[in-house]
C-alpha cells in the first residue's frame, strides 16, 4: 500500500467549494486507477493520550477548518503510473487553480508513505 496525505487548512467561508473540488478531484484520481481518494473532516484536534494535538502541532488560524486528504495506491509504481495520467488530465489543472484560489497552497502539508511490512509477511 502506498498513500499520499495532504493536510489542508481552509478558510471557513470556502469549505463548501473546497469539498466540491475535492470530490471532483477524487473522481479523476479514481478514473485513472487510484484505489481511492478521500477527504476527512476532524472530530477532535485536541491533545489526547499524552500526544500533541493538531492545534498545537500546526498553525491553525481563526476561521480555518482542517481537512486531511488521503490518496491510496497499490504501491509506488502504481502511484507513479496513476499520477502521470492525473497530471496530464486538463480537469485536474483547472481544479488545482480553483483550490489555489480557496486556500494558501504554501500551507498545505503533503507527504507520501509506504506501508511498513512486518518480517515474515
Image (spheres, rainbow, N blue to C red):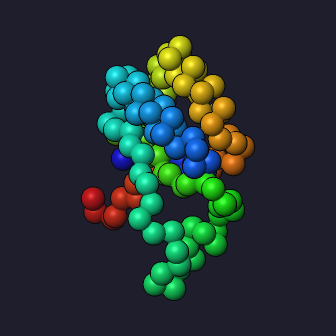
> Quick one: 63 or 74, which is closer to the camera?
63
Q: Residue at x 58, y 44 (%)?
A: 13
Side of 92 where 28 appears, left or right: left
Residue at 34% from the left image edge and 23% from the top image edge: 31
Q: Is residue 18 visible?
A: yes
Extreme left residue here?
Answer: 121
Quarter of the view holding residue 23: top left
Residue 56 percent coordinates (x, y): 64, 72
Instruction: Look at the picture and state if 28 lies above or below 4.
Output: above
Q: Residue at coordinates 42% horizontally, 41% vertically from top-left?
A: 71
Q: Is residue 84 visible?
A: no
Residue 41, quarter of picture: bottom left
| Residue furthest to the front | 13
Residue 11 or residue 37, whichever sits in front: 11
The residue furthest bottom is 50
In the rendered view, tell whether residue 36 sits above or below residue 7.
above
- Residue 19 in the image: state x and y as whole percent: 46, 39
Amino acid at each position: 500500500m502506498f498513500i499520499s496525505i495532504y493536510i489542508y487548512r481552509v478558510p471557513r467561508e470556502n469549505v463548501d467549494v473546497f469539498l466540491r473540488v475535492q470530490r471532483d478531484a477524487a473522481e479523476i484520481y479514481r478514473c485513472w486507477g487510484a484505489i481511492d481518494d478521500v477527504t476527512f473532516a476532524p472530530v477532535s484536534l485536541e491533545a489526547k493520550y499524552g500526544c500533541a494535538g493538531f492545534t498545537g502541532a500546526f498553525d491553525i488560524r481563526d476561521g480555518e477548518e482542517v481537512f486531511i486528504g488521503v490518496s491510496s495506491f497499490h504501491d509506488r509504481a502504481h502511484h507513479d503510473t496513476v499520477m502521470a495520467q492525473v497530471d496530464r488530465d486538463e480537469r485536474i489543472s483547472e481544479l488545482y487553480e480553483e483550490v489555489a484560489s480557496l486556500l494558501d497552497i504554501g500551507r498545505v502539508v503533503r507527504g507520501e508513505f509506504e506501508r511498513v511490512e512486518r518480517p515474515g509477511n
